[in-house]
Amino acid sequence: MCEFVSWIKKDNTVIFLTGDDVFHSKRGKELQKYSQDPDDLSGHGAIRWFYDFTGGVDKECTDFTTPDNFPKKIVKAIKSGKMRGLGISKQLLTKQAYAEYKKIERQALAEYEKIWRLAWAEYKKIRRLALAKYEKIEQRAYAEYEKIRQRAFWDLFNNEKNRSKAWC
């Protein structure tokens, strides 16, 4: 998996994806369907797929302590909010802003977990009902199989010509 932010340098050009590219374009919607990993929607493979090219040199950086670590085009995209949806870095925010972010994140996580627990409980209920229905059908099918099997065996055994010599 590639890191946020990833880019490819090819022919002195910096090629990368923005949130607008991935989430608000026709090609980006196709990329989302194509991608096997939603966490890699801005990675090197996604960039090559989106722009349909090969080659270049893979680059990535997770050190947001200074914009100097990134190409100017990426700095501009980050500052203008065009990377929304692709990743998060604590280093982009002040301590106060990051504390506010963490508060909102905890609330969102609590809501997610609440919904997840309800969905999981519903799944288990449906699974139990489905299993009970399956077992009922399977038991009837097995009973019918056993009835046919027993009848066939004993109908054959009833005819003395079909019995082994010891049982004649």
Image (cartoon, rainbow, N blue to C red):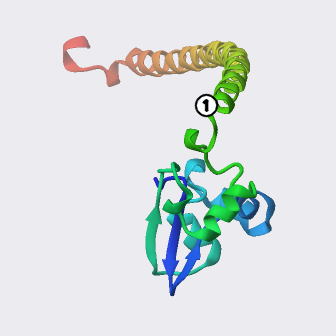
Residue 117 in the image, given as x and y percentages of width and height: 67, 15
Residue 133 in the image, given as x and y percentages of width and height: 67, 16
In which quadrant of the rendered view does residue 124 lie? Answer: top right
71, above or below 63, in the image: below
Residue 15 in the image, given as x and y percentages of width and height: 59, 74
Residue picked out by circle 1: 95
Tell me which residue sits at (41%, 15%) in the image.
158
- 9 left or right of 158? right
166, above or below 98, in the image: above
* In-front residue for pair 119/3: 3
Tell me which residue sits at (72%, 25%) in the image.
104
* In-front residue for pair 130/64: 64
Residue type, mark 1 in image: Lys
Tell me which residue sits at (47%, 50%) in the image.
63
**SS for dot 1:** helix
* In-front residue for pair 28/139: 28
Tell me which residue sits at (45%, 66%) in the image.
59
* In-front residue for pair 149/84: 84
- Farthest residue, direction left: 166
